[in-house]
Amino acid sequence: MAVYFVTDFHLGIPSLEDSHEREKKLLRFLDMIRPDCEELYLMGDLFDFWFEYKTVVPKGFVRLQGKLAEFTDAGIPVHLFIGNHDLWCFGYLHDELGIELHREPLVKTIKGKKFFLVHGDGRGPGDRGYKFLKKVFEFKPNQWLFKWLHPNLGIGLALRWSHNHRLKKLKNEVERGYYDDIPKTRLYQYAQEQAQLNPSIDFFVFGHQHKPMQYKTGDHALTTVVGNWIYDFSYAVFEGESVQLKRFEEVTH
């Protein structure tokens, strides 16, 4: 039996057609791992935008939601770490699908090893602009005001803003080699800091930073940045010894 980690699907971009193809690929992956999946960790940004009204949620990607419900119905725990695109995810996925939601880092012993798990947005030094924006988005009066917009308007505006921002960032990640200098990345620095504070941690697992990578942290820990399901289709698996970083259906760029 194994524990699996996947992250950063951003379903909704760059188009509905592309997202449906990636969703189908994700379903094939979930079917592949289900026979030996002991626990599934979704490390954040399941959708490119999500907002839950009291009685309404964004339409689309019901196949994935149904597949995740199959996992929880079968007694396989599924966890979702709230990412910067999941900020307005409240109780729906927990109440309807049985998914455990995590907004803060989770330190957990898995198969005798201690894990430090978090999406990764707003962690580490710098990035003050985003950290301020996150506080604005998490401010409950702002959430209350947004919900009074009709979903056609509110979700429509949010999707357009999110799409434009995400596509620009994705282009920069690919063309400018973001994250190539690993020691300068925020998650590297964050992991090193946390390793000093928590020297008993064996494995750090992050999402958010789309480039899949692994590196030593502190005296003995291993950090895994799981990657993305936009163009790398990467995932991590832990069977009791070490975290392995893999790709589903290898792709060429």
Image (spheres, rainbow, N blue to C red):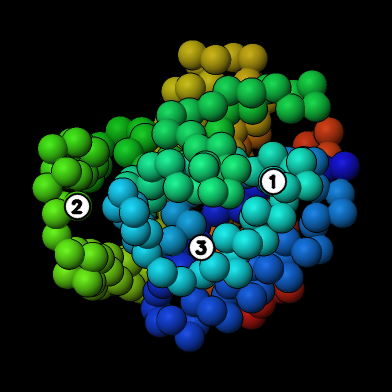
- State which quadrant residue 152 falls in: bottom left
Q: Upstream in the sequence, badge 2 or badge 1?
A: 1
Nearer to us in this view, 233 or 153: 153
Q: Residues within 10 Å of mark 3 (few under 14, many from 20)?
A: many
Q: Which mark is residue 147?
A: 2
Which label belongs to residue 9?
A: 3
Vertical placement of residue 143 versus 174, above or below? above
Quick one: quadrant of the C terminus? bottom right
Q: Which residue is mark 1?
A: 72
Q: Earlier in the sequence, mark 1 or mark 3?
A: 3
The x and y percentages for residue 113 are 74, 24
Q: Position of residue 97 (x, y in %)?
A: 58, 49
Residue shown at 65% from the left, 67% from the top: 26
Can residue 68 be seen at all in this image of the molecule? yes
SS type, badge 3: loop
Coordinates of residue 207 in the picture (x, y in percent): 51, 47
Residue at left offset 32%, top offset 66%: 166
